[in-house]
Image (cartoon, helix red, strand yellow):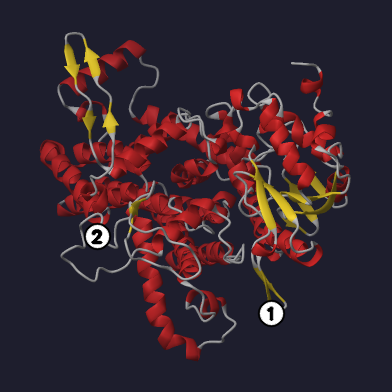
Amino acid sequence: MRRRWRELVLLLVVLAATAVFRLTGIDWDGYEHFHPDERYIAWVATTIEWPADWQTAFKPHQTTLNPFYWPAAETTDGIVVPQDMPRKFAYGHVPLYLGVGVTRLTEWVGEWLRPFLPPDWLLTRDIFNGANWNEYRHLTAVGRLLTAITDMATVLMIYLLGRRLFAPAAGLLAASFLAVNVMHIQLSHFFTVDPFMTFFVVTAVYCMACALTTSGKRTGNWLLWASIATGLAVGSKFSAVMLIFPLTLTAVWSQKQHWKQWLTISIFVVAATFALTNPFAILDLTCEVRTPATHLGPLTIPSINWGACYLGNIGTQGAMVRGELDLPFTRQYAGTLPYLYYLEMQFRWGMGPLLALVAFAGLGWAIWHGWRQLGWGGRPAREKVQQWLAGITALQFDRFVPEDGRIQAQLVLLAWVMPYFLITGGFYVKFMRYLQPITPFLALYGAAMLWQWPRSWWRRGVITAVLLTTTLYAISFINIYSTPHPWIAASQWIHTHVPTGSLILSEQWDDPLPVTLTIDNQLYSRQAYRLAELPWLTQVDERDTREALYQNLELLAQADYVVISSNRVYGVIPRLPERYPLSSQYHQLLFDGALGYELVFVTDRAPNLGGFFLQPDTFGWPGLRPPAKVAAYLAARSGVRWGRADESFTVYDQPLTMIFANTGRKTAAEMLASFRVVNSGE
């Protein structure tokens, strides 16, 4: 009993730390919608309403519930909402509906509770909407809170899974690792779908483990819960469909002679859960989604129009991650190595060096441990393959599986992690968040590996070092939220230093500045300036011509300021001179002052602790020299340049932002003379 109380106290401490890390800085951008995925989800969410007429509630173009279509008469204060037209929505319905439902709940509860709460509390002002914000902003605030709570629940679930499969101490250690995982902390600040998918994935795997480690009727009950969680995971993000592998093994191993019936029931429950929570993935068949005709010898399979908007969006996303669509925001991954790039980003930024080392070593340990538990150690490879083939052919899967339910559950866990990592790690597009659905299990593997070491000062030292360094890194990360977002700081500088009517250029595919702000109770609108874009990222290959360059230089000659909001553009173009033979020279010329522009403002925010900064290097990978004033700005503070960072890690909440003033007033022809390719006649 004493041990259980101590375990409970330690778990509460871990969950409290989890809450602090995830709720600190929930207003990290002043709710200015600087995350594009969050921005779009919240935009769509403003049109999701409880149906006024149930006769049309499930008619795709008449309902207010369909994420794939803008309702005909919907309006929202503060933003422009298209009406009566299709929209692209590449996410599951589950996080969207949860966000809208919880927002409506806070509106109702807030009316009762606000008079009894301090008006300056974040809960009162932001969540219960004491500030009386419009729906677009309030949805973002509540959605972020919901995401944070969901990730906290993931920490709890990985503790429960570790406790069941290994030991209470391993579960606590895994939860501790996940609580201070910086990638999870960052993603919990965004109202996006990945944390929801991750929670349902961990829940599904936990239910599978319970099905394999219990007996009697409870086995079937846990299998049904696992099926429901799987349906919700797929309903959050389609890539969770790979849960079908561990779910199938769970049905086979837990139900033995009746596994076929139970597998059929499980798949039905998954499909039913998905359909109930994502109804318009089934109902909206108004899109053109065509598979091409296929010729198989004398047999021809005709072209088929499936019509499902959901399948169309999934197909587009699949083509994007495979690199089949040439999109500006995915060109950053040109030249990156499959699998190794993910490992590098986790080592540098996602987990930090020690936690990443332990987590991926734990994965290797789990694979080796699973191999041994299958009884394959030292046996000829040919015999192993023959046994597998014989068992699969005869549908006798228990022929090569141990009877121990915990070992079966550990193998089921691997049946999720390994296929997901092997498939996702090979994608052309490698956003760090794509790895989130397996990072809780990596934390668990690392914890289990360490806890099975012999008791010694060595084990205690390694655990202490991993927890201490990762916790310090987590603290340094949330410290970025103690200073204004760089785009807000830059916008404040523009509103107070740049004359109204000035022409300000931004780069296409980056966020344009300034944003509209209230400063000292006075509203400053971005409409007070003339704003235009430089479309460098869209002028690629044969479109990167002298004529296109000259048009941009003419715009530069007329402009008063150029804003470089982030490295979205200069982090890509200089690395691809074969695709951008002319525009790849632009940024270095701008930074060196050769185009007549002078740096007048720079700001950023980076992980820091006690005045020591962990600075991402946005210039080294594209081979650029930063402007002299930026180099001095970075050199003035102590810290380390910690190498390149995935754009998705820095660009939303910690970009380095620069503003250049047109002090030289060069003509377009004078600027053109600085481009060496043009001068050489090529």
- Asked which secondary structure carries label 2, the reply is loop
Of badges 2 and 1, the one in the foreground is 2
Q: Is residue 281 left or right of residue 173?
A: left
Q: Mark 2: which amino acid?
A: Gln
In this rendering, is residue 485 above or below 590?
A: below
Task: Say which label, 2 or 1, has the lower sequence index.
Answer: 2
In this rendering, is residue 64 above or below 323?
A: below
Q: Position of residue 479 (x, y in %)?
A: 69, 61
Q: Report the residue at 49% width, 78% height from top.
A: 129
Is residue 156 visible in the rendered image? The answer is no
Q: Quadrant of residue 324?
A: top left
Figure quadrant of the C terminus: top right
Q: Position of residue 157 (x, y in %)?
A: 40, 56
Figure quadrant of the N terminus: bottom left
Q: Observer-nearest residue: 546 or 223? A: 546
Q: Report the residue at 61% width, 63% height from top.
A: 28
- Asked which secondary structure carries label 1, the reply is loop
Name the residue that disc number 2 marks.
62
Q: Position of residue 448 (x, y in %)?
A: 48, 44
Are circles 2 and 1 on residues that touch, CB within 8 Å? no
Question: Residue 642 bears which disc, if any?
Answer: none
Distance from disc 2 to disc 1, alpha carbons, whole Å, reads 42 Å
Q: Is residue 48 left or right of residue 81?
A: left
Residue, far top: 297
Local packing at callout 1 (Cα closer than 10 Å; few below 14, some 14-19, many 20+) is few
Q: Mark 1: which amino acid?
A: Asn
Local packing at callout 2 (Cα closer than 10 Å; few below 14, some 14-19, many 20+) is some
Name the residue that disc number 1 marks.
521
Q: Position of residue 520 (x, y in %)?
A: 72, 78
In this rendering, is residue 61 above or below 373?
A: below
